[in-house]
Image: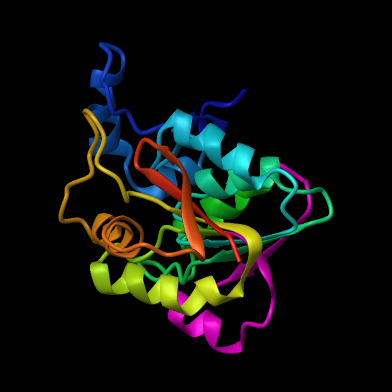
Amino acid sequence: MLFGRMILFRPFQPTPEQIKVPFVYRWFRHPLWGWLGLRPVFAQHTQVEHEALIKWAKGRKSIVEIGVAEGASALALRKGMDPSGTLYLIDPFHLSRFPLLNAMKRLAKRTVNHVKKGKVVWIEKFSFEAVKDWKIPIDLLFIDGDHSYEGVLRDWEDWSPFVVVGGIVIFHDARVFPNGWVKPNDGPVRVVNQLFRKSSTSEWKIIEEVHSMVIVQRQK
């Protein structure tokens, strides 16, 4: 396997081998190096979270991810999704210094295309723009875009009405866990606490928490 096709998962309890990761990040952090195959794809989640994404995507035919980055989480969702399903990936890829090249977008597309299951639709817009014309029921919604309190709450309010009964929403970076990177005042944590911990609702229920991820399911 080529080095650039591997995934380097985010460490939360560093081992002696993982302590070397900051050096790699420092010199090869730009997605151009990943696109050229000179470093692995950098995941912004742990390996345990990766496995959870695959698990919860199983049997889902309409999956939406907000915030794609280098495509590692989208790859997990595509691995698990129903072979006849569609994966909608929403990201404006607006941070590239060289728009015509846009190494981040190129790397993400190559990463996701390592799996050929189902269909992938790329939506190069901000989530609040993409939702304006949205009409498709959603089986799984992964919120991992704007991490500000306002951004996460807006994504929830905009997109959760499209989630079907029995469908799930996964919030990333939404839970403080031992030796993790998430802080109590982070936007996703505040939104999840406000919606599901500090107030009761019969429509949505937390069904699993995995490292920084919180998974909620629509009950009715």
- Residue 107 belongs to magenta span: no
Residue shown at the point (46%, 29%) measured from the top left: 47
Residue sitting nearer the eye, 1 or 7: 7
Placement of 206 over or under 219, stated as above or below: above
> Left of 2 or right of it: where is 18?
left
> Left of 19 or right of it: where is 96?
right
Q: Which residues are magenta?
A: 115-140
> Left of 44 or right of it: where is 71?
right
- Residue 125 in view: no
> Left of 1 or right of it: where is 124?
left
Question: Residue 122's x, y, as percent?
Answer: 62, 67
Image quarter in which the N terminus is found: top right
Placement of 38 over or under 86, stated as above or below: above
Question: Residue 161's x, y, as percent?
Answer: 55, 76
Q: Quadrant of residue 124?
A: bottom right
Question: Residue 9's x, y, as percent?
Answer: 41, 31
Placement of 14 over or under 43, stated as above or below: above
Placement of 3 over or under 150, stated as above or below: above
